[in-house]
Image (tube, rainbow, N blue to C red):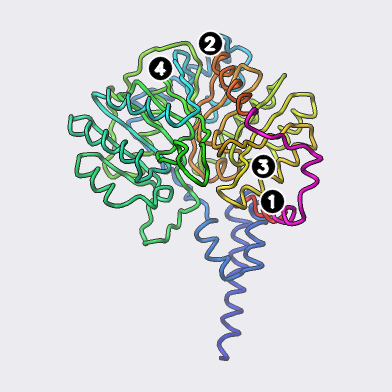
C-alpha cells in the first residue's frame, strides 16, 4: 500500500509533463489547448488515454505523396494561372469580381481553376444514386470510389453488385473507405468484392482490434470518378439512410454534385493521392485517368483540407466568400460550431446589413455537437442573422451560397472537426445559374423549417442551457 502515493505522484508528474507538451510542443489552437488541459486536470488518468486517442497531432511528415504528380503539370498550371491573374492576363468567364477567392485557393491549395464544366445538382439520395449507378454501368476503363461510410444494406448491396459486374468485364474498380466510418461493414461484404476483382483499401485502419490511435483524423471525403470523365462530390454516403429509409432520421436532405469537365481531373488527383496513402499498390500516372472533355461553362475549383496542413483551406474559402457578400449569405450545415474567425466573419456580415441565413437540423446525430450548434446559433441571432430549423427530416447538406453568384458544396461542415481534424473536399462554384439553383433549394427547404427567434431562444429551459454550456465548453475538441 505504501507504493500507491508514489504511483499517484508519478501520474501527477506525467500529467503535468503532458500538459506542458500540449502547450509548448503541439502548437494547438488556444481554445483546444485549454479544453485538453481541463480534461487532464479533472480526469487525469482517463484524460491521458483520451488524449492519446483523440488529441495527438498527426506526424509533421507529408502523408500524401505522389512522385508522378509532377507529370500532370499541376504546379506549372497553378503558377501559370497565378501569373496571369497578377498580370491581368487571365481569361475570365464572368469571374472577374471573384479573382481574389480563386487566387486564394490557387496559392493555398494548388486548386486549379477550371471553366469548362457542366454541373448537375442533386438534393435527394434517390436521384443522386440513380445517376451514379447509371454512370458506373457505362464505365469502360476505371471506377474510383471514396466514401466515409459504406453500409451493408440494400443500397450498399446494389452498389456492390454493379461494381462486381464491371470488374468481371475488365474495368478497373477501386474503392477506398474510411476505417472508422465503415467500422460496422461486414467482412463478408469486403471479401465478396475482393473475390470479384474489386480493389479495396481502408484509410487509417486500426492495427489493434477495437483501438484506433488515429480515431480523430478521418477521411470524410466522398468522391466518385468514372473513366476520368465524370465525377461526384458532396455529402451523401452509401447506405439506405441516405435514401430516407432510416426510422431515426426519416427523410435525408443532402446536396451532391455530378461534374463533367476539367474539374474531374482535380478530383481524380485527390482520389489517387488518398489511395496511394492507404495502399501498398500505388496508382501510377496514366493519361487515361485524365480523360476529361469540356462539357459546359461553369467555373469550378476542387479544394481539399485536412490535418496534414496548417492552412485550413476550406475554412479560409468560406471566410473569403462571406466577407465578399454584398446582399446575402445562405448556409446549410448539420453542425454549426464555427471558430472565432468564422464566427466574426458571419457577425460582421450580419451587422453590416448582409442577409445571413443559417439552416440546421432539428435532431441530433451527435448530442454534444447538436447542443453546441444551438448555442452558436443563438450567437448569430444576436448579430441579426436568421436561423432556421429543418423539420422535414435530417439536414446533412453542406452548402454556402453568396449573392446568387458563387457557392460551395462538399463534405466540410461548419465545425472545428471539419476544418482541423477531418480530411475534406469541396467544390467551389463560380456560376450564377448554379448559385441560383442552390438558392432556390435553400428557399424550398425554408418551407419545411421553423424559424428560431431570439424570443423563442431565450425561453429554452435550464436543462437545455446547461447542455449548451457544457457542449460549448468542449466544442474545440468535439
Q: Which of marks 2 and 3 is nearer the N terminus?
A: 2
- Secondary structure of the residue carrying tag 3 is loop
Q: How far apart are marks 2 and 3 (CA)?
A: 34 Å
Q: Where is residue 130 in the image (x, y as percent from the top left)?
A: 37, 27
Q: Is residue 372 above or below residue 166?
A: below
The residue closer to the viewer here, 68 or 451, is 451
The residue closer to the viewer here, 405 or 453, is 453
Query: Can the viewer see residue 303 in this picture?
Result: yes
Res. 261 mark = 4
The residue closer to the viewer here, 280 or 218, is 218
Q: Distance between the residues labelled 1 and 4?
A: 42 Å
Q: Distance between the residues labelled 2 and 1?
A: 45 Å
| Identity of the residue furthest to the front in this view | 247
Mark 1 or mark 4, which is nearer to you?
1
Q: Earlier in the sequence, mark 1 or mark 4?
A: 4
User: Is the residue under label 3 in contact with that under label 2 (CB below 8 Å)?
Assistant: no
Q: Which of marks 1 and 3 is nearer the N terminus?
A: 3
Q: Position of residue 472 (x, y in %)?
A: 69, 51
Q: Name the residue under label 1.
A: 472
Crowdedness of circle 1 by 10 Å Cα count: few (<14), some, many (20+)? many
Q: How far apart are marks 2 and 4 (CA)?
A: 19 Å
Amino acid at each position: 500500500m505504501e507504493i500507491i502515493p508514489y504511483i499517484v505522484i508519478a501520474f501527477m508528474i506525467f500529467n503535468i509533463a503532458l500538459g506542458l507538451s500540449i502547450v509548448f510542443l503541439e502548437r494547438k489552437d488556444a481554445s483546444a489547448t485549454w479544453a485538453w488541459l481541463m480534461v487532464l486536470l479533472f480526469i487525469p488518468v482517463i484524460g491521458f488515454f483520451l488524449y492519446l486517442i483523440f488529441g495527438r497531432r498527426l506526424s509533421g511528415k507529408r502523408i500524401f505523396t505522389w512522385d508522378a504528380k509532377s507529370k500532370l503539370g499541376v504546379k506549372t498550371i497553378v503558377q501559370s494561372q497565378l501569373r496571369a491573374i497578377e498580370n491581368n492576363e487571365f481569361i475570365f468567364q464572368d469571374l472577374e469580381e471573384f479573382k481574389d477567392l480563386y487566387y486564394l485557393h490557387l496559392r493555398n491549395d494548388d486548386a486549379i481553376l477550371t471553366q469548362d464544366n457542366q454541373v448537375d445538382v442533386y438534393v435527394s439520395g434517390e436521384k443522386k444514386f440513380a445517376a451514379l449507378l447509371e454512370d458506373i454501368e457505362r464505365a469502360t476503363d476505371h471506377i474510383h470510389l471514396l466514401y466515409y461510410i459504406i453500409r451493408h444494406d440494400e443500397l450498399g448491396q446494389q452498389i456492390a453488385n454493379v461494381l462486381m459486374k464491371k470488374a468481371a468485364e475488365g474495368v478497373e474498380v477501386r474503392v477506398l473507405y474510411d476505417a472508422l466510418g465503415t467500422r460496422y461493414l461486414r467482412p463478408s461484404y469486403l471479401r465478396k468484392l475482393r473475390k470479384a476483382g474489386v480493389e479495396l483499401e481502408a484509410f487509417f485502419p486500426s492495427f489493434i482490434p477495437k483501438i484506433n490511435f488515429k480515431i480523430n483524423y478521418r477521411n470524410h471525403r466522398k468522391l466518385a470518378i468514372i473513366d476520368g470523365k465524370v465525377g461526384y462530390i458532396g455529402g451523401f454516403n452509401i447506405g439506405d439512410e441516405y435514401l430516407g429509409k432510416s426510422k431515426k432520421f426519416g427523410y435525408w436532405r443532402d446536396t451532391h454534385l455530378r461534374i463533367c469537365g476539367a474539374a474531374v481531373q482535380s478530383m481524380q488527383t485527390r482520389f489517387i493521392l488518398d489511395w496511394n496513402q492507404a495502399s501498398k499498390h500505388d496508382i501510377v500516372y496514366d493519361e487515361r485517368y485524365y480523360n476529361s472533355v469540356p462539357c459546359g461553362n461553369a467555373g469550378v475549383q476542387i479544394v481539399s483540407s485536412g490535418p496534414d496542413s496548417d492552412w485550413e483551406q476550406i475554412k479560409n474559402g468560406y471566410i473569403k466568400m462571406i466577407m465578399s457578400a454584398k446582399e446575402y449569405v445562405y448556409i446549410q450545415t448539420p453542425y454549426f460550431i464555427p471558430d472565432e474567425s468564422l464566427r466574426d466573419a458571419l457577425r460582421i456580415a450580419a451587422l453590416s446589413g448582409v442577409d445571413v441565413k443559417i439552416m440546421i437540423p432539428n435532431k441530433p446525430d451527435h448530442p454534444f455537437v447538436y447542443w453546441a450548434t444551438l448555442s452558436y446559433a443563438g450567437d448569430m441571432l444576436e448579430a441579426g442573422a436568421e436561423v432556421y430549423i429543418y423539420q422535414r427530416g435530417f439536414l446533412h447538406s453542406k452548402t454556402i451560397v453568396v449573392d446568387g453568384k458563387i457557392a460551395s458544396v462538399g463534405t466540410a461542415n461548419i465545425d472545428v472537426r471539419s476544418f482541423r481534424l477531418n480530411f475534406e473536399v469541396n467544390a467551389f462554384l463560380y456560376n450564377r445559374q448554379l448559385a441560383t439553383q442552390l438558392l432556390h433549394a435553400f428557399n424550398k427547404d425554408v418551407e419545411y423549417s421553423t424559424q428560431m427567434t431570439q424570443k423563442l431562444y431565450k425561453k429554452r429551459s435550464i436543462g437545455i442551457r446547461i447542455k449548451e454550456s457544457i457542449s460549448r465548453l468542449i466544442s474545440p475538441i468535439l
